[in-house]
């Protein structure tokens, strides 16, 4: 009999998007599947929707409504703890799996007994569900999810620091997610997905990831997402800076990550009025350029964080 796979979906006040996510799970050809939903919503609308869903054979669904809310990290950790499958897929409530994704990811585990997680390429979709080809190409290129990396990833620490391990839509051995878990907001802010991947890799340096060269999931970009929360990078930057005992190639990947997130880490610190830390990042070797108009704007933000509100209002229109 095939292994049970759990799809874990944390959700919060997005019933219509959650329905799309669940539908994408029901379209998978892999069986048996268990869909677990942990709901932080204050109302019963999501619960009523979930209870009305008809399930095909060999698919089960479990639902929990949390009161009080567990927040993002607590919600995910609850799902990790409750999962009964030998392998698990984390799926955010505004994202979807593409047909055949779980079967393709499951097959990738046959590449080696040392594979602990498999992932593919993500489509970037807009709020209306339309695929953005330009954003998709840039997003996957940024994280080295490109054809040249197909197959076994033998240095998984480097992969995690590249951000190649995606924020969701991956298939992973369930005992590992139970042992690693998400860290709380006080420790890592909203960068819990990237932090999870890095700690997973550091704890299992002899294991392998498998990268499948096909689109396996869709990542939705919402105007209401965490992009204006200013809690995404400042703690990840500091935690990454503290990493020790890395190989030269891993250190290079870490420095590349710091360069990727330096500007946003500065903005996050400015928003939280940590002016000294923001200036330290500005004058660090990881800040890209101090001779641009953007650099002048960042210096302005450090002195006058209120400037950030104007930018966020413009973006939110």
Image (spheres, grey):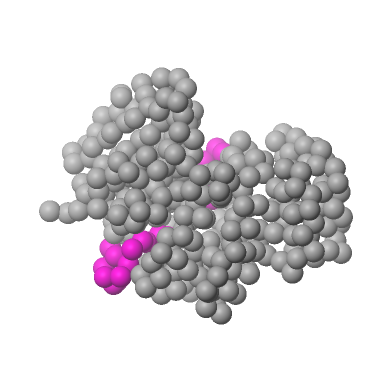
User: In the rendered image of this protein, does residue 150 appear above or below residue 240?
Assistant: below
Residue closer to the observer: 132 or 313: 313
User: In the rendered image of this protein, does residue 181 appear above or below residue 67?
Assistant: below
Q: Which residue lies furthest to the left in this view?
A: 1
> What percent of the width, then of the height, locates residue 311?
78, 41
Q: In which quarter of the image is residue 229?
A: top right
> What percent of the width, then of the height, locates residue 110?
26, 68
Residue 92 appears left or right of 36: right
Residue closer to the observer: 183 or 39: 183
Q: Is residue 120 magenta?
A: yes
Residue 62 appears left or right of 273: left
Q: How many labels does the image show?
A: 0
Q: Which residue lies furthest to the bottom in this view?
A: 248
Residue closer to the observer: 86 or 199: 199
User: In the rendered image of this protein, does residue 16 appear above or below residue 92?
Assistant: above
Q: Residue at x 36, y 21 (%)?
A: 48
> What percent of the width, then of the height, locates residue 71?
49, 35
Q: Does the magenta stretch include residue 241?
A: no
Q: What stretch is highlighted in magenta?
A: 107-131
Residue closer to the observer: 39 or 247: 247
Instruction: Tell me if I can see residue 226 in this picture.
Output: yes
Q: Which residue is drawn at 72% across and 34% down?
A: 317
Q: Residue at x 56, y 56 (%)?
A: 136
User: In the rendered image of this protein, does residue 240 appear above or below residue 253?
Assistant: above
> What percent of the width, then of the height, locates residue 38?
38, 34
Q: Residue at x 26, y 42 (%)?
A: 34
Q: Quadrant of residue 119?
A: bottom left
Instruction: Tell me if I can see residue 24 in this picture.
Output: no
Residue 264 appears left or right of 310: left
């Amino acid at each position: 009999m095939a292994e049970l796979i759990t799809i874990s979906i944390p959700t919060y006040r997005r019933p219509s998007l959650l329905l799309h996510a669940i539908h994408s799970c029901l379209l998978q050809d892999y069986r048996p599947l268990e869909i677990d939903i942990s709901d932080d919503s204050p109302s019963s609308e999501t619960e009523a929707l979930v209870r009305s869903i008809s399930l095909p054979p060999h698919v089960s669904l479990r639902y929990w409504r949390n009161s009080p809310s567990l927040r993002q990290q607590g919600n995910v950790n609850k799902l990790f703890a409750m999962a009964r499958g030998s392998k698990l897929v984390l799926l955010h409530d505004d994202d979807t799996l593409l047909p055949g994704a779980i079967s393709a990811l499951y097959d990738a585990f046959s590449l080696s007994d040392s594979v602990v997680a498999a992932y593919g390429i993500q489509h970037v979709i807009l709020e209306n569900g339309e695929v953005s080809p330009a954003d998709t190409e840039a997003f996957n290129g940024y994280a080295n999810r490109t054809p040249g990396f197909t197959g076994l990833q033998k240095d998984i620490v480097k992969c995690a620091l590249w951000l190649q391990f995606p924020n969701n839509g991956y298939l992973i051995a369930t005992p590992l997610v139970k042992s690693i878990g998400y860290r709380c907001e006080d420790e890592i802010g909203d960068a819990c997905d990237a932090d999870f991947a890095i700690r997973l890799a550091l704890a299992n340096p002899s294991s392998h990831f498998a990268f499948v060269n096909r689109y396996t999931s869709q990542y939705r970009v919402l105007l209401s997402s965490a992009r204006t929360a200013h809690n995404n990078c400042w703690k990840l930057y500091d935690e990454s800076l503290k990493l020790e005992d890395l190989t030269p190639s891993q250190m290079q990947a870490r420095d590349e990550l710091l360069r990727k997130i330096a500007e946003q880490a500065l903005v996050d610190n400015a928003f939280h009025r940590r002016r000294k830390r923001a200036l330290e990042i500005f004058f660090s070797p990881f800040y890209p350029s101090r001779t641009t108009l953007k650099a002048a704007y960042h210096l302005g933000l450090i002195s006058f964080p209120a400037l950030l509100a104007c930018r966020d209002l413009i973006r939110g229109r």
